[in-house]
Image (cartoon, grey):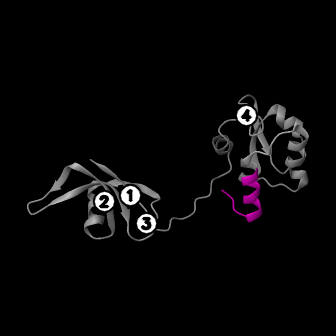
């Protein structure tokens, strides 16, 4: 069974669907063919049709927002299994960007991966002050996560 890529109206991927379902969407005028297989058209008694490989819906489909749950695995995966401060992949642990004592929360966007060495040196300090003391640039991931916290959006 052949599969085709189904794109939303704004070209974001929705899923992979069957050729039969994809062809029906195109035939009913609900989707358009973006890419097709030139070597293998769909043959009927009356006409040959393009065999779609990628189709795009003509109307936008709003998808429900899926919140990422807080788990060690998800934080490790997001941060690439490396310390966000020094890049080490040894003795990793979770670090609060904004420590609880300074008003931080236990939400997904307040945790990053830090090696034991960096986490102990940072201790309960503000991340900007600590980076200045250490002479390192504040990692982009931390700036992005702090921005999310200000906006009230959680992954």
Q: CA distance from mark 3 to mark 4?
A: 39 Å
Q: Which mark is residue 6?
A: 1
Marks 2 and 1 close (CB-CB < 8 Å): yes
**Is residue 121 found inside the magenta-colored segment of the image?**
no
Query: Can you give x and y, in whole percent of width and height, for residue 117 in the image?
Result: 83, 31
The residue shown at (89%, 36%) is 121
Dot 2, how many residues are within 10 Å of its Cα: few (below 14), some (14-19), or many (20+)? many
Marks 3 and 4 close (CB-CB < 8 Å): no
Please state if 81 lies on the left or on the right of 1 as rendered. right
Please state if 138 lies on the left or on the right of 17 as rendered. right
Residue depth check, mark 4 versus mark 2: number of the one nearer the observer: 4
Q: Which mark is residue 9?
A: 3
In terms of secondary structure, where does tag 3 sit?
Answer: loop
Marks 4 and 1 close (CB-CB < 8 Å): no
Query: Can you give x and y, in whole percent of width and height, for residue 99 in the image?
Result: 86, 49
Q: CA distance from mark 2 to mark 1?
A: 8 Å
In terms of secondary structure, where does tag 1 sit?
Answer: strand
Q: CA distance from mark 2 to mark 3?
A: 15 Å
Taking 144 as reference, is 29 above or below it? below
């Amino acid at each position: 069974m052949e599969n085709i890529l189904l794109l939303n109206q704004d070209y974001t991927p929705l899923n992979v669907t069957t050729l039969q379902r994809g062809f029906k969407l195109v035939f009913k005028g609900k989707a358009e063919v973006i890419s097709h297989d030139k070597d293998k058209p769909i043959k009927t008694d009356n006409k040959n049709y393009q065999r779609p490989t990628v189709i795009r819906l003509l109307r936008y489909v709003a998808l429900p927002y899926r919140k990422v749950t807080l788990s060690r695995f998800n934080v490790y995966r997001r941060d690439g299994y490396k310390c966000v401060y020094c890049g080490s992949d040894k003795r990793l642990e979770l670090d609060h960007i904004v420590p609880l004592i300074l008003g931080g929360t236990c939400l997904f966007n307040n945790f990053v991966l830090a090696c034991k060495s960096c986490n102990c040196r940072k201790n309960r300090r503000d991340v900007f002050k600590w980076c200045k003391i250490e002479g390192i640039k504040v990692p982009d991931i931390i700036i992005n996560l702090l921005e999310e916290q200000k906006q009230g959006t959680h992954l």
